[in-house]
């Protein structure tokens, strides 16, 4: 029989160092921080708000996949942003967010890496990796113009039995140590805040992202929105953040779709 985890402490808002210009609210439970923040944006909320919940009861990730974890076992939050960059750079925001989370976790998890476009995983050498964080970025039409809701879910303290799939992991499982969530949240927010400027220099962002993206150079199956699946080698990230995949019939780009790493033999 698997023993129950020890009681998990709540986040401590009084100790949460919020980056300059941002505001943080912590709520006990909400169905979805992205949905709640999008609603507030449409009602006139200003950028810079970080909404954090101890328990997200109906979360979802990319492609509308369900994402739910036990209370106080993860970091689940959304940030409301209005990037002051050309519309063509907005497509880089999901990749920038993944890069910021990867950078924040790198000291704790040396093998942390990115799977295109923004899954943060521990690279185990198999090609698949163990996912520790998922990201969902959504565009919202607000009264003062479009805004971005940046949703992040980090598996922090889950046990093996609490993880939703066998390919997932948590920070504490990887380090073998308990993780103080308030400090980790401050670290991740600081990383995202500090790296926002890379949206003004997508060439630098592209190079930095590619350096930690383990999708590049691997054989991948691309599940396209229409249901087709194409296999090829992930070659590059183009100027818009799309994945360039090479096949015997030539290269194609993937801006939307599910990319699966083919496991090494």
Image: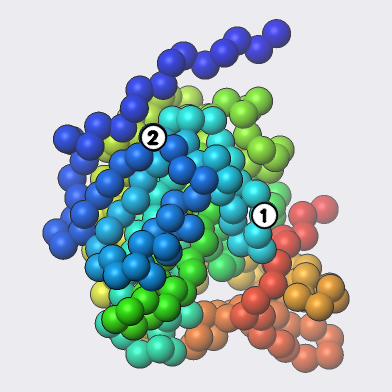
Judge whether 42 appears above or below 102 on screen: below
Whether residue 109 can be seen here: no
Indicate the secondary structure of the residue bearing disc 1. loop
The location of residue 260, given as percent across then percent down, is 73, 62
Which residue is found at the position 50% from the left and 50% from the top?
32
Q: Is residue 198 left or right of residue 58?
A: left
Q: Which residue is mark 1?
A: 65
Q: Quadrant of residue 49?
A: bottom left
Q: Which residue is mark 2?
A: 28
Whether residue 173 can be seen here: yes
Q: Quadrant of residue 57?
A: top right
Indicate the secondary structure of the residue bearing disc 2. strand
Which residue is found at the position 54% from the left and 30% from the top?
70
The location of residue 239, given as percent across then percent down, is 49, 88
Which residue is found at the position 29% from the left and 70% from the top?
44
- Callout 2: 10 Å neighbours few (<14), some, many (20+)? few
Q: Are marks 1 and 2 in contact (CB under 8 Å)?
A: no
The location of residue 143, given as percent across then percent down, is 33, 79
Q: As drawn, which residue projects farthest toward the left?
A: 20
């Amino acid at each position: 029989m698997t023993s129950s985890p020890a009681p998990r402490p709540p986040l401590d808002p009084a100790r949460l160092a919020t980056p300059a210009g941002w505001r943080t609210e912590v709520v006990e439970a909400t169905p979805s921080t992205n949905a709640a923040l999008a609603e507030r944006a449409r009602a006139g909320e200003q950028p810079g708000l970080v909404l954090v919940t101890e328990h997200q009861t109906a979360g979802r990730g990319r492609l509308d996949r369900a994402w739910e974890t036990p209370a106080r076992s993860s970091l689940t939050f959304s940030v409301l942003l209005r990037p002051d960059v050309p519309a063509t750079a907005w497509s880089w925001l999901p990749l920038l967010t993944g890069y910021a989370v990867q950078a924040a976790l790198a000291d704790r998890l040396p093998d942390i890496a990115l799977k295109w476009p923004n899954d943060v995983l521990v690279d185990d050498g198999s090609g698949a990796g163990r996912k520790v964080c998922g990201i969902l970025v959504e565009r919202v039409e607000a009264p003062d113009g479009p805004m971005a809701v940046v949703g992040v879910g980090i598996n922090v303290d889950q046990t093996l039995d609490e993880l939703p799939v066998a390919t997932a992991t948590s920070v504490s499982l990887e380090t073998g140590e308990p993780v103080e969530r308030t400090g980790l949240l401050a670290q991740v927010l600081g990383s995202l805040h500090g790296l926002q400027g890379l949206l003004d220099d997508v060439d630098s962002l592209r190079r930095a992202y590619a350096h930690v993206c383990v999708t590049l150079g691997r054989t991948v199956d691309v599940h396209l929105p229409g249901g087709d699946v194409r296999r090829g080698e992930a070659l590059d990230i183009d100027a818009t953040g799309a994945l360039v995949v090479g096949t015997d019939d030539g290269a194609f780009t993937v801006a939307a779709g599910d990319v699966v790493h083919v496991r090494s033999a």
